[in-house]
Structures are given as C-alpha cells and as structure tokens.
Amino acid sequence: MALACALTTHGGGVEAQERTSPSWARPADPLVAEMLYPGFAAMLEQGGWARIRCWIEDDGHPFLCEVADEAPHGLGFGAAARVTIASADVRAARVDGQIVGRMIQTTVRFAMADEGVPFGGWTGPEPSGGKLALARKVVSDRAEDFPPSYRDSMMNGLDFDRRSIVGAWIDELMPFDPVRATDALVLQAARLFTEDELQRMLAGENIDPPSDEDFYAASPDATPEDEAAITELKRRYCDRWECGVDPLGTTS
C-alpha cells in the first residue's frame, strides 16, 4: 500500500494528511479468466491481454471499469478482461481514513494452457453401446438442453463486423453436417452423464449441466481434416487481421 503525506495550511497551522492509494486486496480469479477465454481466439491458439482502468469509490469488487487498451483487437479480450476484473477485490483510496474516489489500472493476460485444437482429448471411460443408445434418445427428445455445438460457438468473442467474413470461411472449410453434429452430441451426453441421469432426463427431470469446458472436452477428437481446416482458417484470419500478440503484451 502506497503511503504519502501532504502538508496543508489552515489558519496559520500545519496539518499532516495521511493518504493511501487504491490497491488490490485480492487479485482476479484465474478460473473466471479461463472460463471467459474468447472461443475464437482459443481456436486460433491466440493469447492476448487487456488493460483495464477502474474508478474506485468503495472497498470491494470493482465495477466502474473500462477497457483502456487490448491486443489483439477484435477477439474479445477486452470484454472478457472487464468481466474478469470484477472478481477481484480492491481497497479504495483514503485521506485521513475517509474514502476518496481514485482510478486504478491493471492488465489481465490470457494465455493458452496447452497447444492443439481446443476440443476433444477425452480421458474418461468410454460409454457402452447401451448407454450410447440411451443418450441418443435423450438428444432426440431434449437437444435444446445441451450447449451450442462447437461450430456454433466458434466465433465467440469475435467482433461482429468480422463475423460475416469469418462465417463464410467456416461454412466453406467446415460445412455443417447434421448427422455428425448429432453423433457428437450423443457421445458427449453418454460420456458426461450416468445412466441414471440419462434415464431421469428422459423422464423430464432437469439435471445440472456440465461446464462448457467439460462439454467440449467430451467432444470427439479432431480429425486430420478438422485440424487442416482450422489451420487454413487461422491463416486466412491472420493474413487479414491482427495476430501474433503474446499475453505478455509484446508483438512477435
């Protein structure tokens, strides 16, 4: 905590004021940053950072915040960082023990934990044929209960003015296959839910859904064709827009 003394004059006397600057009492939760990692940036295996500036006029979570800068632009790191920083705690500035409004600034950094296509890699037990059949019934009856398909979430975080161009690339490189999409949902449901849970879902009971991270980890592994398509999508995107920014805030 920074501490400074200022001298002021009142009626010929000299009075010391104790001043403290705003400070971070508890950092932002890294799990929140992980959950908010922009989906399209993750697919590009692109890290990034955002500088967040907050006006602090009370102790607690900072909410009056804005994005001062971010890189790469257009991938959603600024918006994700602004929400992430709200999970931190701050101690407001004070003058002689009284809270005064002050600005505080910090940088939130996003880095890919592992390389590779960000879906698949299931390490749990594989479902039996009977469980797969049960999961297929659930998906047929309650498909709306499942998170959006990986394809539907691919442009998460991407600026809206870029989505028409990127969406056309996705349609070209990874055309939607309804049969494959349904098979993927069936496998995910069979991997993530117990037989009892699937039976209860068929009966109309609501079961707590898995996290998006677990849901996509239960996806079928990427095929060589998937990986080639994503490589080409990344090439096109980075040729047209900004890439090559690392989470340390430097440009490669």
Image: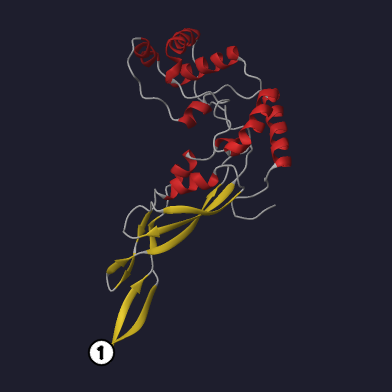
- Which residue matches tag 1? 11
Which residue is located at x 40 percent, y 49 percent? 86
Query: Residue 238 sits in which quadrant?
Result: top right
The residue type indicated by label 1 comes to Gly
> Against 41, is 5 above or below?
below
**Quadrant occupied by the N terminus:** bottom left
Measured from the top left, where is residue 3 in percent x and y?
A: 37, 74
Count residues near mark 1 (Cα–Cα under 10 Å), then give few for <14, some for 14-19, many for 20+: few
Tell which of 240 and 38 is nearer to you.
Answer: 240
Residue 71 visible in rendering: yes
Which residue is located at x 63 percent, y 25 percent? 222
Query: Residue 150 sits in which quadrant?
Result: top right
Residue 42 visible in rendering: no
Q: Left or right of 59: which side holds 110?
A: right
Which residue is located at x 51 percent, y 17 percent? 185
Q: Secondary structure at mark 1?
A: loop
Tell which of 123 and 48 is nearer to you.
Answer: 48
Measured from the top left, where is residue 109 in percent x and y?
A: 54, 50
> Against 224, is 180 above or below?
above
